[in-house]
Amino acid sequence: MTDPEGGDDGAEDLAALAELAAERARERQALQPKALATVADALAARTADATTAAAAPTRSPRVWLSRAGWCLQCQTPLEAGRATCDACIALARHERDRAALALAKAQVPAAHRDASFRALRLELGAERARVSDSKTLEAVFSVAKAWVSGEYDPLVVVLWGNTGCGKSTLAAAVALATIRSALPTPDFSPPAAVVAMARGFRWVEAVDLGEARREDKLGQVPKLIAQARSAPLLVLDELGRENDPDVIYRILQARMGLTGSDPARPTLITTAKTPTELRAHYDAGVWRRIQDPNFALILQVHGGMAPPDRSRRLP
Ligand SMILES: [Zn+2]
């Protein structure tokens, strides 16, 4: 398993791939005349075939070219019957993964898209630090590490604090660490569960969920709600802004694996509500689970617009 914090956006992978590509280009240049000669031979052979045996079964160009013995992508020699060499297959897979993970990364709101634990640690103590509490930061980092190693313990993390305290940035740091650790390198393939978690990651604003439900005209589950329920990793941002607590109840119930049909899936919740307010606002059953230390971790993120009300205690 890679360090979830490792490699700023896979810069090292890129360097390795660039080197691989350069090597392939050199080989391609060296082999080009030979490859062309092979094609010329094959063409001549096929023309002869066509004239002498008009009834011969037609072969697809792909099969025919691969029989010429070189990779269709980079023209390196290849055993007969194959169209693409291992290096080109690996490169294509890597590019496909990068594209999928870039799409997942685009889920994170632009304001938090550069979040990383490294950056947050460097900011600690600085005047404009987004998260000023190192204990909270390290607790969230531990969660990120557990999740990318396949342990969903805790299953739910609730980050609460005032507007501007950095709770969404912390949630983004976890999501982006997961996405980074899902990127394969030439000599490392991340576990399928991590890749699925990173690719299927969704960032949902709680306020949009109530809106989505109003669009539900045919009795079907609106797409956004279905995604929030089943995403392998979810950030539910600004819980409490929605005007429909019931939709939150159903989503959390599904994500906690309490419906009997859905497996438990890791969830990050940010909210400006205090634990006392959350308890008053949401269904007691869901709240009981959120409160259960075996299920959830509730962390206060200090800072932001106004000092949190210290008189309120965890219920
Ligand atoms: Zn190739």
Image (cartoon, rainbow, N blue to C red):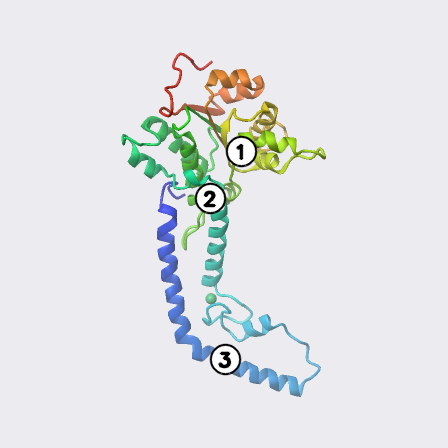
Tell me if residue 279 comes above or below residue 122 in the rendering: above
- From mark 1 to mark 3, how far is it between C-alphas? 54 Å
Q: Nearer the viewer, residue 116 or 7?
A: 116
- Which residue matches tag 2? 105
Please tell me the numbered disc located at residue 38: 3
Any part of residue 81 in sight:
yes
Give the residue type that dot 2 points to. Answer: Lys
Rendered position, 203 above or below 132: below
Which of pointers 2 and 1 indicates the residue nearer the eye?
2
Residue, x 38% and y 33% (percent of image)?
A: 141
Find disc 1 in the rendering and name its residue.
265
Q: Amino acid at mark 3?
A: Thr
Q: Earlier in the sequence, mark 1 or mark 3?
A: 3
Q: Residues within 10 Å of mark 1 (few under 14, many from 20)?
A: many
Secondary element under disc 1, as helix, strand or loop, is loop
Q: Quadrant of the N terminus?
A: top left
Density class for disc 3 (Cα within 10 Å; few <14, some 14-19, many ≥20) is: some
Q: Is residue 235 above or below residue 240?
A: below
